[in-house]
Amino acid sequence: MNQSITRELRPLVGSFVTLLLITAVAYPLLVTGVAQLAFPARANGSIVTAGGKDVGSALIGQSFKADAYIQGRPSAAGDGYDASASSGSNLGPTSQKLIDRVIKDAHAFRAANGLPADALLPADAVTASASGLDPDVSPATALLQAPRVAKARGVHEAAVRELILAQSERPILGFFGEARVNVLHVNLALDREFPRQ
């Protein structure tokens, strides 16, 4: 009877070990190898370097507080752009907490950018993304910040607007997604083109 059980278990254990090696070892190694060969920058986190130093990832937003920089979307991830606490606020559209936060963010955005109290704002200027780590803003949100950035850098607003538009990315294939500006890329371009005094 013991030999019978052993005989029946041997193919099961063999199948389990074989599938384990295929799915847990061979497949991940194959996918990682192909990604490293075909898309090395993306496979390694789309790290952006400036002056020989890593300054961030093009895929994860970060906080820019100085007036000389374009600021990203509000973040509900931890204390802001905390990748270990990635999440949205999970507050529904009728949540008073969400309404209060959006009103506060709208007031702060208008005040920081010298806009009238009744100025209409793009949604991404006052709402967090689902992950809380969105690295992009709409061109409209970036352009609303151009006067503040130009003043802080001592350059003409038109030059900052031109740089923002040059950094804007179109929807994929012309219709997938929305036009966007990567905040890290545009801020690095601002530092290159218009160094702060």
Image (cartoon, rainbow, N blue to C red):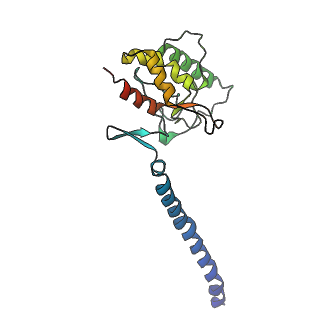
Is residue 125 visible to the viewer in this orientation of the structure? no
Residue 90 drawn at (x, y percent): 62, 34
Is residue 93 visible to the viewer in this orientation of the structure? yes
Residue 56 drawn at (x, y percent): 41, 39
Residue 134 drawn at (x, y percent): 53, 35
Q: Quadrant of the C terminus?
A: top left
User: Residue 14, located in which quarter of the rendered image?
Assistant: bottom right
> For this view, does 33 lie left or right of residue 10?
left
- Examine the rendered structure and indicate whether residue 113 appears above or below residue 58: above
- Examine the rendered structure and indicate whether residue 116 appears above or below residue 50: above
> For this view, does 76 lie left or right of residue 93?
left
Say which of 111 and 170 sits in front: 170
Residue 43 drawn at (x, y percent): 48, 51
Q: List the single residue furthest toward the right.
A: 94
Q: How many tags in the picture? A: 0
User: Residue 187, located in which quarter of the rendered image?
Assistant: top left
- Residue at x 52%, y 15% (from the top left corner): 110
- Examine the rendered structure and indicate whether residue 111 appears above or below residue 171: above
Q: Quadrant of the N terminus?
A: bottom right
Say which of 166 and 62 sits in front: 166
- Residue at x 50%, y 58% (from the top left corner): 32
> For this view, does 31 lie left or right of residue 15?
left
> For this view, does 50 lie left or right of residue 57?
left
